[in-house]
Image (cartoon, rainbow, N blue to C red):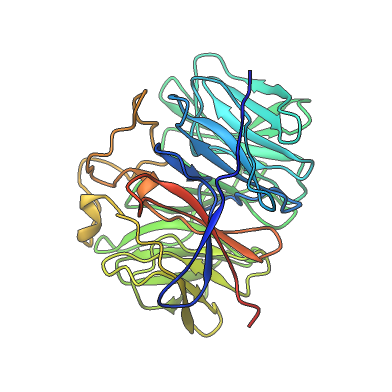
């Protein structure tokens, strides 16, 4: 039986910026919103989608933005905790075990969109027209970037490789070009929707740690982090490499129109920054005050034992493991992301001792 909880919503004023920050969860357990490459708000802006461990295993939940009422959406024990993406028809698509599933936020009704026996699945990302989600199907040591129809009518492999695959993202354009992360030395990659023209978009020198790639606005550019020095961008044809801003931006997320970037910061943590991608001008939105765990972020090259994990493994149940790790428990990172209308930024912080989900309004100016 899926459960409903009383509203936990409460507000506080950021002492440094004066912004009103809304805390949407308040239970002594780990919570986090969806990964920053996906919106955490439903398309209509009514609900904020997040993961909670309040019942032991992680499940998807929704908080109604206006009332704060919290409702449980899933009860699968094998949820891929950072896989969810809201669709345009009021559902959330996610991976659990060997299946791509969807849950209707208003009713909790679930269905299986596709199953892949013997495979492990990754994050989901919605296509520009809303008809497909992409995920990685890993089986027998090979990765299969796969497009699944959100109406459940079928799935097909777009591209197969023995190389690393992570952070799969459809282009904001209708051509459905796919951005994904390769290994740490060949990080930012694109492949066409017909499976052709797999290519390295940015040929990074061995002295650069490149991470956290995502589309910038309508899809003319891809932005990425040159840790810990800058947020940069490159055109999708591999030309026009530029530095947007020199600072320790960590997980930059573009507003849909590409006119604004929200980014958390680390070492030093100077709060969530709103950045003009055309000029690099920025201002502080608020201060999450999260612990930002992860030993490797103090260095300017990635750990030698392997690539940055494409997704965070779920902590053991009944309680999460909050110990330090190489790249850190992902629920201690703010991971800011915009609502569909660009009005709100969602983030996660463990400032209270437990990771909770927050949202803050973007100033009109």
- Image side of residue 224 versus residue 217, left or right: left
Q: Residue at x 41, y 41 (%)?
A: 310
Q: Position of residue 268 (x, y in %)?
A: 27, 70
Above or below, 360 relative to 194: below
Question: Image quadrant for the C terminus?
Answer: bottom right
Residue 220, given in percent of the width and then of the height, sits at 63, 67
On the rendered structure, is 184 left or right of 347?
left
Where is residue 234? Give x, y as percent.
51, 69
Q: Residue furthest top?
A: 117
Q: Nearer the viewer, residue 113 or 80?
A: 80
In this view, the residue in front, 234 or 46, is: 46
* Residue in view at x 52 percent, y 73 percent: 19
Quarter of image, res 158: top right
Snapshot quadrant of residue 243? bottom left
| Rendered view: 290 above or below 63 | below
Q: In the rendering, at what x and y percent does residue 71 appear?
A: 63, 34
Q: Is residue 4 left or right of residue 187?
A: right
Residue 311, visible in the rendered structure? no
Please tell me which residue lies in front, 288 or 228. 288
The residue located at (38%, 62%) in the rendering is 250
Nearest the eye: 175 or 31: 31
Q: Residue at x 63, y 17 (%)?
A: 1
Q: How many marks?
A: 0
State whether residue 228 appears in this view.
Answer: yes
Residue 233 higher or lower than 7, as above or below = below
Q: Quadrant of residue 301?
A: bottom left
């Amino acid at each position: 039986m899926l459960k409903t909880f009383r509203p936990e919503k409460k507000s506080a004023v950021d002492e440094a910026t004066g912004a009103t920050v809304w805390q949407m969860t308040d239970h002594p357990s780990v919570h986090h919103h969806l990964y920053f490459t996906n919106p955490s708000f439903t398309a209509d802006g009514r609900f904020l989608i997040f993961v909670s461990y309040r019942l032991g295993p992680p499940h998807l939940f929704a908080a109604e933005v206006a009332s704060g009422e919290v409702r449980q959406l899933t009860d699968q024990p094998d949820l891929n905790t950072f896989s969810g993406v809201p669709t345009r028809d009021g559902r959330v698509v996610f991976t659990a075990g060997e299946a791509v599933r969807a849950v209707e936020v208003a009713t909790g009704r679930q269905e299986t969109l596709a199953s892949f026996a013997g495979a492990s699945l990754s994050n989901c990302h919605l296509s520009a027209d809303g008809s497909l989600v992409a995920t990685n199907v890993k089986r027998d040591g090979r990765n299969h970037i796969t497009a699944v129809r959100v109406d459940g009518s079928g799935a097909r492999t777009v591209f197969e490789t023995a190389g690393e695959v992570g952070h799969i993202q459809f282009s904001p354009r209708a051509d459905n070009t796919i951005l994904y992360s390769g290994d740490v030395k060949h990080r930012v990659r694109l492949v066409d929707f017909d499976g052709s023209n797999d290519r390295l978009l940015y040929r990074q020198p061995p002295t650069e740690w490149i991470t956290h790639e995502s589309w910038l606005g309508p899809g003319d550019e891809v932005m990425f982090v040159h840790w810990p020095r800058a947020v940069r961008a490159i055109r999708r044809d591999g030309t026009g490499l530029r530095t947007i801003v020199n600072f320790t931006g960590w997980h930059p997320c573009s507003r849909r129109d590409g006119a604004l970037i929200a980014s958390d910061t680390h070492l030093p943590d100077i709060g969530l920054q709103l950045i003009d991608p055309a000029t690099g001008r920025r201002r502080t939105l608020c201060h999450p005050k999260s612990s930002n765990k992860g030993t490797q972020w103090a260095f300017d090259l990635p750990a030698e034992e392997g690539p940055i994990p494409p997704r965070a493994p779920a902590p053991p149940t009944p309680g999460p493991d909050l110990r330090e790790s190489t790249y850190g428990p992902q629920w201690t990172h703010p991971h800011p992301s915009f609502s569909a209308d660009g009005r709100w930024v969602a983030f996660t912080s463990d400032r209270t001792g437990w990771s909770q989900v927050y949202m803050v309004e973007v100033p009109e100016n």
